Image: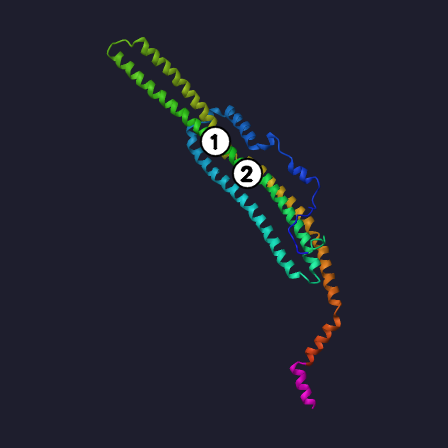
Amino acid sequence: MVMTKEPAQSPTSPTREKEDLQKPTAVEASPVASRLSRCVETSYQTRRDSLHALDLVPLTKDYEVLRKRLRSLVATAKHFRLVTLQADEARLTMLQALTDLSIDSPIYRCIGDTTNEGSMASLQIRMSTETKHSGDRFQKNVIDYAAEWESVVNTQIDAGLVEVKKLRETLNHYESKVEGLRKKTNSLESKGKTTPDRKMERLNRNEAKLEEAAKAYEDKALKQCALMEEATAQGWRDLHPLVQRLVKWETERCDRESGVLLGGKPYLEFLDETVSASSDSTPKATEENADTVDQKSPANSETSETDK
């Protein structure tokens, strides 16, 4: 039987599949969003006096740097998983080549026979199964977290910047409008004329709107500063859980793969025993061939001529 890539039972815990299928709760699904929401509100309430709308300019530059780095992290993590799976496929392809070479030989059962649980093929197929499971866990615990981190930060900050821009435009509108109305009022008063009630009401109404627009802009700008500062300067707090997840994944991957590879030791013994048994079955033929070669050597021919 030629080695095939049929899945084999993984030597890992039988409860792993259930654990992998468990969906995270809403809170677990958005740890970055939860942290930002909590910390930004606290920062806004306790540090309002130290926040300034003008800080939006340098904070926006910091955000652009973070944005590029998060994009790079997600891309490299996805690439890592891809090349890992490609390496696994290459390993199985190489195994197929070894299997083809072992067909009709005494060691085929040790190499490519998938019906033999102790064969190299069975060992590598179990390793391949574990690699795929490991890739799924990497996707869930590392890639998904990084992608969510990127999405939450980009979505919240981009939406906030758009809102701040609109509020700034509204504020500019009422500043310009009130300035024009005041000029008209001042012009009438400079000529000794009384401003009509209708124009005064309009001025007062727009001044009230200007005050509201200024307050709305200031509040949103300060909250946006708190958000961007928390996402950039304090972004290491979101990086920390990711590093923990990555280290845990690496540790568990090594443990699981080591468990599979432990089957390689008895395999080597099985292979050596098979080779020894095959060699012992024709020892005389080997010795006779060696004697024949020795007799036909140039040195022996010269000795024979001398004896004559």
Depth order, front residue of 283/142: 283
Q: Quadrant of the C terminus?
A: bottom right
Residue 300 image point, x, y percent? 68, 83
Query: Label 1: few (<14), some or many (≥20) within 10 Å?
Result: some
Residue 106 image point, x, y percent? 71, 62
- Residue at 39% of width from left, 17% of height from top? 209
Q: What segment carries the magenta color?
A: 296-308
- Res 178 → quadrant: top left
Q: Quadrant of the N terminus?
A: bottom right
Q: Label 2 amino acid? A: Ala
Horizontally, residue 286 falls left or right of residue 52, namely: right
| Residue 71 at least partly seen | yes
Magenta span main SS: helix
Residue 146 is labelled as 2
Horizontally, residue 244 falls left or right of residue 259, namely: left
Label 2 and label 1: CA atoms lie apart by: 17 Å
Q: According to the image, label 1 marks what residue?
A: 157
- Residue at 50% of width from left, 39% of height from top? 70
Q: Secondary structure at mark 2?
A: helix
Query: Label 2: few (<14), some or many (≥20) within 10 Å?
Result: many
Q: Secondary structure at mark 1?
A: helix
Depth order, front residue of 148/194: 148
N-term mark: 2 or 1: 2
Residue 230 is labelled as none
| Residue 52 at least partly seen | no
- Residue at 67% of width from left, 54% of height from top? 121
